[in-house]
Image (tube, helix red, strand yellow):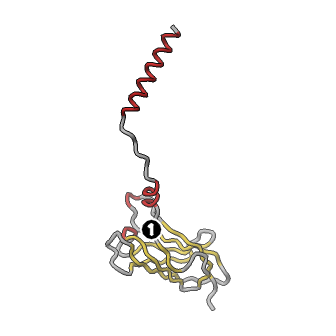
Amino acid sequence: MSMLRTKRFIAVAVAVLGLAACSQPQEAPDTETTIAAETPVVVIATPASGARVTSPLVVEGTAPGDWYFEAQFAGQLRGADGAVLAQAPARAQEDWMTEAPVPYRAEFTFAVTQDTPATIVLQEDMPADNAHPREVTIPVVLTPAG
């Protein structure tokens, strides 16, 4: 009986391997394309990461047209504890009804009495399928005026 089970096992294994060899090969996912598709293509041209900035803080760069709704998307200035210190819309500076990069500008007003670590957060408006909005962040240091 043991010899019969062994022969059956070998026959089934050979059949499974034969079917696998005849099936269409699966293409490996293109990881570069997948990563690029999920990574926001938003550029923050000014200020530079880690810059010391005073109020009013002007943030400029480019974002793809699908980040905008009615020619703007959300911008926040958050403290180290995550608290929102200032909000301002990032407004398109050209026609935003495109998939190409569109220049934006946001201006944040804040008041601090000492150097304060903060983060600029830019967030797409109206993400598809109620998904969590894509965002980009850069650290800055807020400095007192004058």
x and y percent of residue 79 in the render? Answer: 60, 73
User: As drawn, which residue projects farthest toward the top?
Assistant: 1
Residue 64's image quarter? bottom left
**Along the horizontal axis of the image, is 76 left or right of 81?**
left
Q: Nearer the viewer, residue 142 or 111?
A: 142
Q: Nearer the viewer, residue 53 or 87?
A: 53
Please state, as top left, top right, bottom left or bottom right, where the C terminus lies in the image: bottom right
**Disc 1 secondary structure class:** loop
Q: Is residue 82 above or below residue 60?
A: above
Amino acid type of the residue that numbered disc 1 sits on in the rendered structure: Val
x and y percent of residue 31 in the render? Answer: 46, 54
x and y percent of residue 140 in the render? Answer: 60, 76
For the image shown, how many numbered marks are present on the structure?
1
Residue 27's image quarter? top left
Residue drawn at point x = 68 percent, y = 82 percent: 114
Residue drawn at point x = 39 percent, y = 65 percent: 126
Please rate how many residues cluster around mark 1, counting C-alpha atoms within 10 Å: few if below 14, some from 14 to 19, many from 20.
Answer: some
x and y percent of residue 53 in the render? Answer: 59, 83
Residue drawn at point x = 43 percent, y = 47 percent: 28
The residue that mark 1 highlights is 41
Q: Nearer the viewer, residue 29 or 57?
A: 29
Residue drawn at point x = 43 percent, y = 49 percent: 29
User: As drawn, which residue projects farthest toward the bottom?
Assistant: 146
